[in-house]
Every structure is written in structure tokens, then in C-alpha cells.
Image (tube, rainbow, N blue to C red):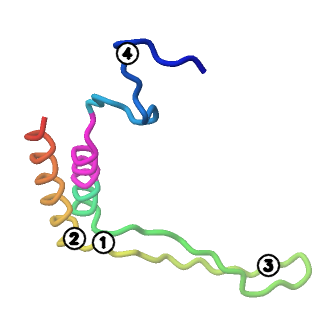
Amino acid sequence: MAPPQRGVRVDPRPYVLRGSPRKPILVIGIVLLVVGIAMVAYQGISYTRREQVAQLGPLRVTTEERKTLPLSPAAGAAAVGLGAILIVVGVRRR
């Protein structure tokens, strides 16, 4: 490897992106805001669980049970608030 030329700076950390327009705080804030809005809007995720009860030769007996995973609206509101704060902090640091 040839020595660097005079007046040319070599970054010892070439894997670091310098001057990246996206800041991690801003991105995390946007993600929290979107997830919080979804949590407040949907308040729960429903899914169907199928379970095989018995099998006798080619005959199968199954049951379907519908379950709901509740999402707290308070947690969604907290995520929206924290996301908004992080967005404001990320924009002010520019």
C-alpha cells in the first residue's frame, strides 16, 4: 500500500458514513410515531389458531380458535408522545 500523499487526509474509520442526512434519533422517532398511531388505531391484533384434535386414518378433526392479542392504548399514546419528542430533538440538532 502506497503512503498517503501530502495534504490528503485518510479516514482511519472508512466504514463510518460522514455527513449522513438521517440521524438515528430522527429515524427512531418516526418509527415510534408510526407504531404508536397503529397501536391507538387498532387496539388489538386478532388471529386464528388451528389445532388438530384427532386423526383416524384419512379423517382429521380440527378446531379453530380465534384469539386477540390486546394492545394498550396508553402504550400507543406513550409511543406517539416519545416519537414526537425524538423527532423534535432530531430536527433541532441539524
- Chain-order first, disc 1 or disc 4: 4
Residues at marks 2 and 3 touching, judged by CB atoms closer than 8 Å? no
Numbered circle sitting on residue 75: 2
- Asked if 5 appears above or below 45 in the picture, the reply is above
Sequence-first tag of 2 and 3: 3
Range shown magenta: 22-34
Find residue 49 and report its image quarter. Answer: bottom right
- Please say if 92 is above or below 78: above
Residue marked by disc 1: 71
Element on which disc 4 rests? loop
Q: Which of marks 3 and 1 is nearer the N terminus?
A: 3
Q: Main secondary structure of the magenta part?
A: helix
Of circles 1 and 2, the one toward us is: 2
Q: Which of 23 and 65 is in front in this view?
A: 23
Q: What residue type is labelled 1?
A: Leu
Q: List x then y, in percent, for residue 82.
A: 16, 60
Q: Report the residue marked by disc 3.
A: 60
Q: Is mark 3 on a helix, strand or loop?
A: strand
